[in-house]
Image (cartoon, rainbow, N blue to C red):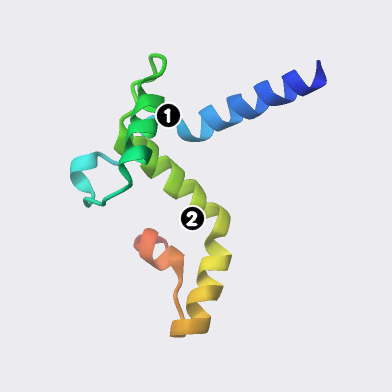
Amino acid sequence: MKCRKKQQAKAQEYEALFIKESSVAARMGKMVYIRREFHDMLKTLCNVGNNGITLSGYIDNVLAHHIETYENEMNRLYAVKHKGLNINKIINPSKT
């Protein structure tokens, strides 16, 4: 019973993080290529339920979470190789 509740909580957390509208419209971004199987799977995920999320919105949410989670590591890796990346200056130029 505990395992089922834990799985349900993880599913709700995932949905709250990623299966939501993005603040960025797809036409405002850039085109990127992903594997066809990823595209098909993610498109299917976006169409589940009545959440109104687009594929580009889902990808934007995943990338925003990834950058927030690993920002320090990304800065460290870049600094080692290129002497000085600050992710915040790139994604939030008005806040720096």
In the rendered image, residue 74, in percent from the top left (x then y), is placed at: 51, 67
Q: Count the numbered circles shown.
A: 2
In this view, 16 is above or below 67 = above
In this view, 65 is above or below 70 = above
Instruction: Report, in whole angstroms, how far the alpha carbon at label 2 lies from the one at label 1.
Output: 17 Å
Neighbor class of circle 2 (other Cα within 10 Å; few <14, some 14-19, many 20+) is some
Quarter of the C terminus within the rendering: bottom left
In the rendered image, residue 55, in percent from the top left (x then y), is placed at: 32, 34
User: Which numbered disc, 2 or 1, marks the residue that appears first in the sequence?
Assistant: 1
Amino acid on which disc 1 is placed: Lys
Q: Secondary structure at mark 1?
A: loop
Residue topped by disc 2? 67
Name the outermost residue toward the left: 27
**Residue at 23% over, 49% down:** 29
* 3 on left or right of 75: right
**Residue at 41% over, 61% down:** 95
Q: Quadrant of residue 92?
A: bottom left
Residue 57 seen from this side: yes
Quarter of the N terminus within the rendering: top right
Q: Secondary structure at mark 2?
A: helix
Q: Quadrant of residue 21?
A: top left
Name the outermost residue toward the front: 37
Q: Which mark is residue 20?
A: 1
In the rendered image, residue 59, in percent from the top left (x then y), is placed at: 37, 42
Amino acid on which disc 2 is placed: Ile
Neighbor class of circle 1 (other Cα within 10 Å; few <14, some 14-19, many 20+) is some
In this view, 1 is above or below 17 = above
**Residue at 57% over, 67% down:** 73
- In-front residue for pair 96/62: 62
* 70 on left or right of 35: right
In this view, 88 is above or below 24 = below
